[in-house]
Amino acid sequence: MSGTPYPKEQMHRIAYTKLSEQQISDKLSKVSGPTSASTLSDTFAGKSVRIVTDKGPALAYTFSETNRLALAENGGGAIQAGYGALTLDNVAFFSHLIPGTQRGYAVIVDQDTNLATVFELWFSGYEDNREVQREIYYGYVDQPGKQPPAARHAPTNRVEGKGFYWKQDAGAETLEFYPSAAYSNFVELSRFGGELSYCGPSDYIKINDNLYVYTRTECEFSGTFTAYAVDLNRIEQVGMRLGFDANDELEYYVFRGKGEWLGQLAQFEKFGDETGAPVPAADPGKTAAKGARRVYRPFKTMPKMTKAQVDALVATKSAAFPVRTTGPGASMAGNLGPPTVWLTAKSFTLRYDNAPAIEYRIDDAETLHWRKEGDANRTKARYQAWESTPGVIMFGHLLEGTPNHDGHSIVADFHQGLVTCFNGYLNTPYYANEAGVKILFGVIEMDGLTPPKYRRHFLTDEMIGRAVSQNYAPGLTSMHLYTTPHSLSWIIFTNTDAGGLEWSGPASYVKIRDGIYFIYWLEEACNGTLGTILVNLHTMRDVGIGYNCGAQGLNMSAIGAHERLAGGFDVMRFYQVKSTGSIV
Amino acid sequence: MTAKTKSTRRSFLKRGAILAAPLAAAAPAAIMTDNDLKARLARLENEAAIRALHQRWLHQINSGEALLPLSPSRIGNKDTENVSTIAPDHSAPFDAIEVAAHGGTATGRFRCTVEIETPIAQDCTFARMAHAQGSGFVRRTERRLLSVKYVESSGAWSISSAELAPL
């Protein structure tokens, strides 16, 4: 057997080694330059090139061969280094390290305009030494006797909303989505089997209307830095990758790749706004430090609890749908629709195929009594319910007294007699306060209602690739990008309605009716929340329930948002399970 | 990001340092024979210096370099709110600057429109992410009367207090 394409741990679960500065220096000292699966370009061989940047270094290069150069920074003494260059039409991309340091450069030169973008790269610039830092400088190739060009490459949002499949020359295959002007989303098809998508802070720089530069730093993960120039028409890339993998092996190579266009998402900035870098590196009035950028670091800030801590906390702090305008989750319910009283005074049983049946007796719009079938006593619980479309009721409640502090988020279709429950629970393997979820399918048993014998709600891929924005309340708007059949990503808009910070988590999708989908996502290694929403593409409004255990205890809270369709990507063909060979 | 994007986090105003305007150079002695004329000239010079100070201060407010904390009693007890921009209300009557007869102090009243930021609660992942990227605010625009008190010291005017009152 050749084995599966899946890693032992998904990227957000890998305990990446905290490499010391000395360890990094030792590893870098063994490398002379980037490797390449493609033949290196000789475009610079035998030439001297002086690059002048506006607020950065002057770099005087002498390229002796296709893989050796000499560099004098700011008029200093020359150092010798290995390099690799690749070209994409008029764009030349090269990268090198500076021996004896933890620094290096990636440089993009437009040989038609002589404009250049320079990335200075270094390790050990953040508390996690392995995370590659970058500073961007814009400039030009000095032409003796000629005036410097006035134009510069510049940050842009013109790449925002695009998505591509890429296959590099060494075989690495990825799906890469750019739903934000400050972050991006990637699915590692060949390295990780394509189950989940991940996010990283990104730069988008315009060379011209066809050619752009993209970067990504895998912050919170390996810290690896990827940069490439991309031709949006040819769908070709040349670039580099620098970092340490999960085995702490140095990855440093230049690559060439070809891809496929997957689609275009909507942008929400004002028409005419094509500015990039929408998330400022520093607060207004302050100067950003070299390499500074806003990075969402959810794992660092996540509260982490043991089972004993969770059990003790939940015993004293546990609340379902508390009446409040502030507190956990209140902002997510700003556009919540009115609750329904449809369940009031009804009794029914939700008979799950893969879990004990639950018997319900409903008192009023906020009080129910539940018990597992066969139990003598019922437990009183607070609940809330909403009717998303006639006959389809979403409701939820905590299951007090269960060993893992379960919470049920339920969609019951009383016209079809079908029910699906996202059964949230705590005491999960990595952090006890991090929610897990089981999907329960079943039927409704109630006087006057005959459920189907075989038919059930079912997992669906109909939403995969789509993007839907959610306005939860004034000032709080996100967009879901349904990236893979098992994950989704959320993008937070800036005050100028550009896509800003982004993160992702495991997810599943259940079809309730045409245009109505029940979706969950887990904020794993983030803050542990289980989010569940019932998306109604007819009314473009979602209702939902959040389930979270944090410093304020166990909470179940309502979610409600107005939605907009934001386009989609044609990606399902990349997620087909195949019995042999490549997964693509 | 557009050029009009405004601050969400601001440094507090440092009175008397950045908000100071030197008085204009004294007028030539040859024309200061008439006391009324002299007083009028001094008043005009003071008003000009205060207007220049006012413009620089508004620029600092609007560029995010300074913060104007709102008086809770004046804004409905929302003490977390910030004013992000102040713009002259051109539909309103003229501004008024009154310099005390003895000099040394002055008051200014300016009709303006203000953009007020109210931060959203950081009660969920999405809201925390919004704040992490420097947004996470709801903005509204309202008309206000900006009342400013000035004090002159060592030949320079500075702002001693400022208040935005609802109209």
Image: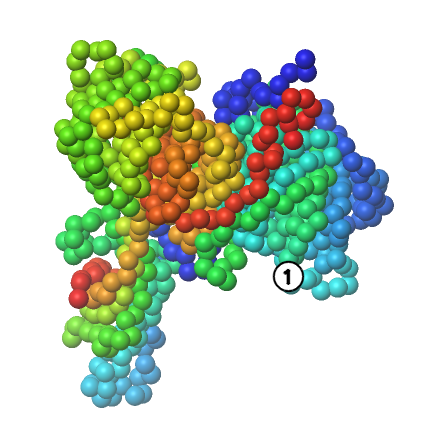
| Residue B151 vs residue A276, the one in the foreground | A276
Q: Give me the chain letter of mark 1.
A: A
Q: Quadrant of residue A431?
A: top left
- Residue B88, how many percent across, how many down? 30, 70
The residue tagged 1 is: A151
Q: Residue at x 49, y 51 (%)?
A: A266
Residue shown at 29% from the left, 75% from the top = B90
Q: Quadrant of the C terminus of chain A?
A: top right
Residue A129 in view (yes/no): no
* Residue A26 figure quarter: top right
Q: In terms of depth relative to the viewer, which is nearer, A181 or A132?
A: A181
Classify mark 1: residues with Cα within 10 Å, few (<14), some (14-19) or many (20+): few
**Residue A324 in picture, x, y percent from top left:** 19, 38
Quadrant into which the N terminus of chain A falls: top right
Mark yes or no: residue A346 visible. yes
What kind of residue is marked 1? Ala
Count of marks, rendered view = 1
Residue B59 vertical placement versus A569 (above, below): below
Tell me the quarter of the picture where residue A394 sits. Answer: top left
The residue at the point 47 percent across, 35 percent down is A488
Q: Position of residue B73 (x, y in %)?
A: 14, 53
The residue closer to the viewer here, A83 or A356, is A356
Left or right of A122? Residue A495 is left
Q: How is the image coloured?
A: rainbow
Q: Residue at x 33, y 64 (%)?
A: B58
Q: Secondary structure at mark 1?
A: loop
Which one is in front, A339 or A13? A339
**Residue A478 coordinates in the image, percent (x, y):** 40, 44
Q: Is residue A576 above or below residue B147?
A: above
